Amino acid sequence: MKRNMAFSHYCLAGLLLLGLSSCAKLPSGSSGQQSGGAKAVALPVGLMRLPQPQVAPPVNRDNPAIVSVELETKVVTALMADGVGYTYWTYNGTVPGPMIRVRQGDTVELTLKNSLDSPVSHSIDSHGVTGPGGGGKLTQTLPGGTSVFRFKALNPGVYIYHCATPMIPHHISHGLYGLMVVEPPKGWPKVDREFYIMQGDFYLSGDPTQPGMHEAVVDKMLKEEPDYVVFNGSVGALSEENALRANVGETVRVFFGVGGPNTTSSVHLIGEIFDRVYPEGASEPLSNVQSHLVPAGAAAIFEVKLDVPGTYILVDHSLARLHKGAAAFLTVEGPENPAVFQSVVNTSPSISGGHSSYSHCVGMPGLRSGRFSGENDEYHVIDAVCRLCTTGTDPTTIWQRWFSNSLLRAISKVSVASAANNAGANSGKDQSR
């Protein structure tokens, strides 16, 4: 009863915010339940990750126009990580939803459909909309319903859109967010490639390392304790065959947003310095930026010219989140550039260097602790990958294998066990005093 009262309290806050009269009902089952205990349901056969949203092309138009945008909220079951399924609520079947790209001065007619099989009402609030609720109140849409509203894109920039149906963060934590890009009248300087990335935090029912299907839960979300913090909807969504790709000498632009609902992002591209960062798509960029903070519900544009070939990792430099999935890989091909970067000598038997070093690998809590040796199969799996560093294995390979999600689950299990052992040890010390 206490649980339901707590949910009702936070739902009421959302109602007051939007001026609504009723709260969207949570689907029956686990979405509003406590996070512990229940065994995960087996994965559907052939379950895959979500498809990736595409970057909308530049507007390339001199005059304002009426632009029609159509979004549909859909329930999609897909992999959050290898062996870990999740029930997403999406715009048009992807997380993030489609990039909406218009020109300053355009009039946008936005149609929101809520699929008939949706368990709850949905809506859309765009931070680029001038008007009460950003469209959230106007688009509260029942399953099977359709809402349409118009707005003028008054300000250039890069803006989050998200569901604004109470309980708002609960809807967002299912994946209901995306970016709206409003170009200035003359656009931005031309670049060779553009990418679309959004970070989100997810809160899973039961043991998030347990294979099977999982739902979103409220209690972890309210405590702000995410099980996964990922780019584009799942662990490894932008790695291996789905890695970002570019060539030496090219300039790339990244539209980056944080859907949340809770975490911020300290955006950093390991091995590069951003030439320009447009906070919120601001008219005046910052230059020569190592890391840039993007709050929840905000976005920015990052630009960098690529001088050296190799694989670069885009991370949230709150690096514990790296082990929850927050990484994207950028593969750059082309000739070496020794005038900018080269190895002179390295006599160490291990590969040295920053975030890919063996010392970084073994520095994780519990990974090299003797109490795990022989007691956890997961320890041996992680240790095997860490030892790749001592055999001359390329750091890119190490990190790609690191983000095979069985390892992430193993890391989580070892960390939990480490915490429990440490708590027991501390308890013993207390009792001996």
Image (cartoon, grey):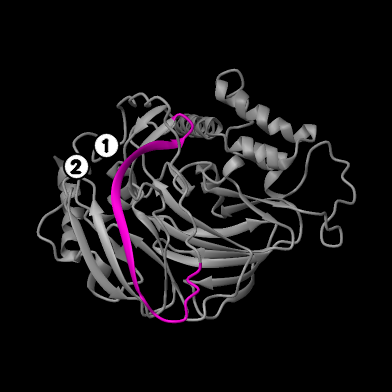
Indicate the amino acid at tag 1. Gln
Residue 34's disc number: 1
Q: Sort mark 2 into few (<14), some (14-19) or many (20+) by Cα contacts within 10 Å.
A: few
Residue 82: say if magenta: yes
Magenta residues, as a range? 58-83
Identity of the residue drawn at 76% across and 35% down = 393
Q: Earlier in the sequence, mark 2 or mark 1?
A: 2
Q: Estimate the x, y position of residue 18 in percent, counting from the top left.
A: 19, 65
- What secondary structure is found at the residue carrying circle 1? loop
Q: Position of residue 140 (x, y in %)?
A: 19, 59
Q: Please tell me whether the stretch drawn in magenta is mainly helix, strand or loop.
A: strand
Q: Are marks 2 and 1 in contact (CB under 8 Å)?
A: yes
Residue at image position (42%, 65%) is 298
Residue 3's disc number: 2
- In which quarter of the view is residue 110 placed? bottom left
Membership of 237 in magenta stretch = no
- Asked whether 341 or 360 is in front, the reply is 341
Q: Residue furthest left?
A: 21
Residue 30 placement (x, y as % from top left): 25, 35
Q: Amino acid at mark 2?
A: Arg
Residue at horizontal 42 percent and vertical 81 percent from the top: 63
Q: Quadrant of the N terminus?
A: top left
